[in-house]
Image (cartoon, helix red, strand yellow):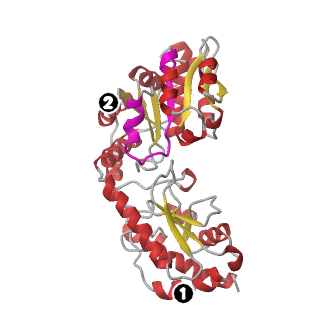
Amino acid sequence: MLRGLFSNRRGFMRSALAVPGIGLSAQTATAQRKRRAASRDVLAELGVRPFLNAAGTYTRLTASQMSRSVLDAMQVAATQYVDLNELHEKAGDQIAELLDCDAALVTAGCASALTLGTAACVAGSSEDGIRRLPDTTGMKNEVVLQKSHRNAYDHAVRNCGVRLVEVDSARDLAAAINERTAMLFFLNHAEHDGAIGHEEFVRIGKQHGVPTLNDVAADIPPADNLFRFTKMGYDLVAFSGGKGLRGPQSAGLLIGRRDLIEAARLNNSPNSDSVGRTNKVNKEEVVGMLVALEEFLERDHDEVWKKWEQSCARIARNVANLPGVSTEMFTPEIANAVPHLRIRWDYSAAQLTPEQAAEELRQGEPAIEVRPRSSEGLEIAVWMLGSSSTTTVPLTGRVQRTRHFIPVICG
């Protein structure tokens, strides 16, 4: 009986999410064909199943969608040939002006920015050093970071052949710095997990003349983070381009000190004999990243935030009268730090856990992805549910479908 009710549950979720103003992605093959009749739907041809993104900007879920103006700019760029080094230089100068920093480089995602930033601190602009990485013989080859800041992405730092030195306190950090120290690494997402805060971390780096790099990958918004850390004194700051900025998913940004950014470019594609040769960024991604950044900075972020809150509130109202169901709006402290909605119920009475509900939504038609790895309830991120490249699903039959949710949630 429980299984038989899941189709109604999916109907409930579609109704709850398909609220005017949210703009649900109708990412079915039919909707795509209606929107772009002249274009092939290769995803449909391959049998790759799209879904409604109520999860957020996760790389595995292909993060965000680009705006029509970003796609148009990339299309224009794709029809022309340019000198890639010249484009990198001029786009970097424009981005640096927008972000009020010394210099900038469009990279192949944030992981690429970490590798190139590390290479810049290790090999610098030395032609011999650049050719030899990840062999760091004769170079500074240690990167110091807090133990609590170790993460699955620091492999991008280790790609340069460095040894990671873990510390627990500011005293440990200062003591760990020596003639082999190439860089100090900070993971912004783990700011509150360690004993050393931003300002103290930067101060220690400045005192010892060692460059500092901050990984701010998914921490946009808030928009201020684009400026905050270079103003604070970080020598390098790395961002994902295809998350909150809504640029190409294969792009990112490395900003900071001009000498280090110039060294990062030398360690990068299209330079053949370099550790970053695999991190190719072509003209389309460079142009798309620049246009996406321009659009992001021009956006009324307060107004966008209000719309996200309104979307959460509308979904909450849709389930407010269901016995045993409660909702709360929350904002993750760092990474995807935007309004979310959490829906809870009596899991034991319903014989349905949040994980099971999420899986049923994933298997539904259309498929819906909610925030992963949550045991606190169904967690819905509304900010990736709408974009200029999606269509809107109207709210129809809401009352009838939500009533079917009552026996499932309340047992």
Amino acid type of the residue that numbered disc 1 sits on in the rendered structure: Arg
Task: Determine the image quadrant of residue 85.
Answer: top left
Residue 267 in sight from this viewpoint: no
Q: Quadrant of the C terminus?
A: bottom right
Look at mark 2 in the image and give the residue it sits on.
Answer: 93
Amino acid type of the residue that numbered disc 2 sits on in the rendered structure: Asp
Q: Residue at x 36, y 52 (%)?
A: 71
In the image, is 213 to the left or to the right of 74? Answer: right
Q: Residue at x 33, y 56 (%)?
A: 68
Q: Residue at x 59, y 15 (%)?
A: 140
Task: Using the image as rendered, state which of residue 246 and residue 144 is in the foreground.
Answer: 144
Bin the neighbour count of mark 1 within 10 Å (Cα to Cα): few under 14, some 14-19, many 20 and up.
Answer: some
Task: Determine the image quadrant of residue 136.
Answer: top right
Task: Using the image as rendered, state which of residue 215 and residue 265 is in the foreground.
Answer: 215
Please tell me whether residue 214 belongs to the stretch shown in magenta.
yes
Q: Can you tell which mark lies on residue 403?
A: 1
Range of residues picked out in magenta: 206-232
Q: Position of residue 319 (x, y in %)?
A: 50, 78
Residue 40 in sight from this viewpoint: yes
68 lies above or below 129: below
Q: Secondary structure at mark 2?
A: helix
In the image, is 39 to the left or to the right of 121? Answer: left
207 lies above or below 366: above
User: First in sequence: mark 1 or mark 2?
Assistant: 2
In the image, is 410 to the left or to the right of 328? Answer: right
